[in-house]
């Protein structure tokens, strides 16, 4: 396995693909210790960030380099993915054969299918680090985000050395973000999937903030059923989730972001393809293979797909 690239210099070259809410939050923090370049296709967003930098809450703006040209990120020593799971292949295809073979690809995306998509785009030997983050981030303008900055990022190696995972965790910690490394990232990815499956589609279909799901008994019953199905599939796959009670965990996640709509709700509003296939659809697919019925998740997939087709 390739050793990690030289990452102990004072100013690492870090690439970020995606200038949305999470790209803004992580880019802002990483810019404190690294030379950050952000790739995005939105010219207006790039123009604003190039002019005004990135800012989170009331922090002073931090300058970063912006580009719409993938080749400007080819020399990145670490490459972070902050695009929707549905966009992973498209975003990474221009990088095939162009990156240093030791450059780790860090995915904190939703869903459990990002590793195969990254390998399809870049090849099976690419060092991949997968993770989840409980950092909250809401876009309030181009390169501007509001965040509680109280979350934690958990990462683990998918096909990278343990040393590379620790290097990336240290990089995040030095940038002011809480981060830790685990031996097996799958339980945490599936824990996040349980929460996303229970929250995102319900918020999108009802066009409501997450807190409404807890306040309305019908919405909460639906979300609980989605979470229980997802947890049953994980159990059949012998994945030990990082919680005992799925609905209790989902309720906690909702309470943290109660005032925000899900990203899927914004996808339906904006006409962007949703992540339904990578969330509830993934649970249906894995459930079919494991022989676990998932009627609630299957229904949510069909409803969201119908909404996408009819908008």
Image (cartoon, rainbow, N blue to C red):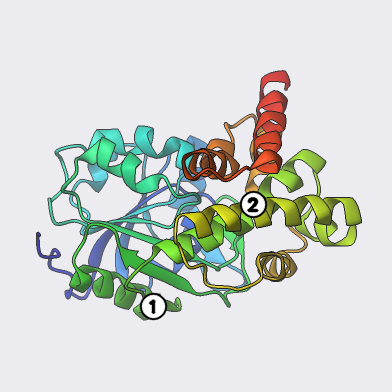
Q: CA distance from mark 1 to mark 2?
A: 29 Å
Q: Is residue 75 left or right of residue 214?
A: left
- Residue 97, relative to residue 199: is it above or below? above
Q: Residue furthest top?
A: 310
Residue 172 in the image, given as x and y percentages of width and height: 37, 73
Residue drawn where x is 69% and y is 50% of the image = 226
Residue drawn where x is 89% and y is 61% of the image = 215
Q: Is residue 53 left or right of residue 129?
A: right
Name the mark nearer the viewer: 1 or 2: 2
Q: Quadrant of the N terminus?
A: bottom left
Residue 50 seen in this snapshot: yes
Report the residue marked by disc 1: 180
Among the two numbered marks 1 and 2 on one chain, the one whose residue lies closer to the N terminus: 1
Camera-nearest residue between 157 and 72: 157
- Residue 76, relative to residue 88: is it above or below? below
Residue 158 in the image, given as x and y percentages of width and height: 28, 58
Residue drawn where x is 25% and y is 47% of the image = 73
Report the residue marked by disc 2: 229
Q: Residue furthest front?
A: 291
Dot 1, how many residues are within 10 Å of its Cα: few (below 14), some (14-19), or many (20+)? some
Residue 31 in the image, given as x and y percentages of width and height: 37, 67
Residue 261 seen in this snapshot: no
Camera-nearest residue between 183 and 172: 183
Q: Is residue 261 left or right of residue 106?
A: right
> Looking at the rendered structure, which numbered label has been put on residue 127?
none
Residue drawn where x is 45% and y is 76% of the image = 177
Considering the numbered disc 1 on the image, is that residue within a helix, a strand or a loop? strand
Q: Quadrant of residue 201?
A: top right
Tag 1–tag 2 contact (CB < 8 Å): no
Considering the numbered disc 2 on the image, is that residue within a helix, a strand or a loop? helix
- Residue 131, relative to residue 273: is it above or below? below
């Amino acid at each position: 396995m390739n050793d990690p690239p030289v990452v102990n210099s004072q100013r690492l070259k870090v690439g970020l693909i995606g200038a949305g809410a999470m790209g803004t939050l992580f880019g802002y923090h990483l810019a404190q210790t690294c030379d950050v370049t952000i790739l995005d296709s939105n010219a207006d967003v790039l123009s604003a960030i190039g002019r005004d930098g990135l800012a989170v809450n009331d922090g002073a703006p931090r300058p970063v380099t912006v580009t719409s040209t993938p080749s400007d990120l080819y020399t990145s020593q670490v490459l972070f993915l902050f695009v929707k799971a549905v966009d992973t292949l498209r975003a990474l295809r221009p990088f095939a054969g162009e990156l240093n073979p030791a450059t780790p690809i860090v995915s904190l995306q939703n869903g459990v299918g990002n590793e195969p998509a990254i390998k399809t785009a870049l090849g099976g030997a690419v060092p991949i680090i997968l993770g989840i983050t409980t950092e909250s981030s809401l876009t309030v303008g181009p390169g501007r985000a509001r965040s509680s900055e109280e979350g934690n990022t958990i990462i683990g190696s998918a096909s990278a050395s343990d040393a590379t995972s620790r290097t990336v965790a240290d990089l995040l910690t030095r940038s002011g973000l809480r981060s830790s490394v685990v031996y097996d990232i799958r339980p945490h990815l599936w824990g996040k999937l349980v929460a996303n499956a229970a929250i995102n589609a319900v918020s999108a279909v009802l066009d409501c903030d997450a807190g409404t799901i807890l306040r309305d008994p019908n919405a909460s019953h639906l979300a609980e059923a989605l979470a229980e199905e997802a947890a049953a599939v994980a159990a059949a796959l012998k994945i030990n989730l990082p919680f005992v009670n799925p609905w209790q965990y989902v309720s906690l996640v909702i309470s943290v972001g109660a005032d925000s709509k899900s990203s899927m709700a914004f996808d339906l509003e904006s006409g962007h393809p949703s992540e339904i296939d990578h969330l509830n659809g993934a649970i249906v697919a894995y459930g079919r293979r494991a022989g676990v019925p998932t009627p609630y998740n299957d229904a949510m997939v069909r409803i969201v797909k119908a909404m996408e087709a009819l908008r």
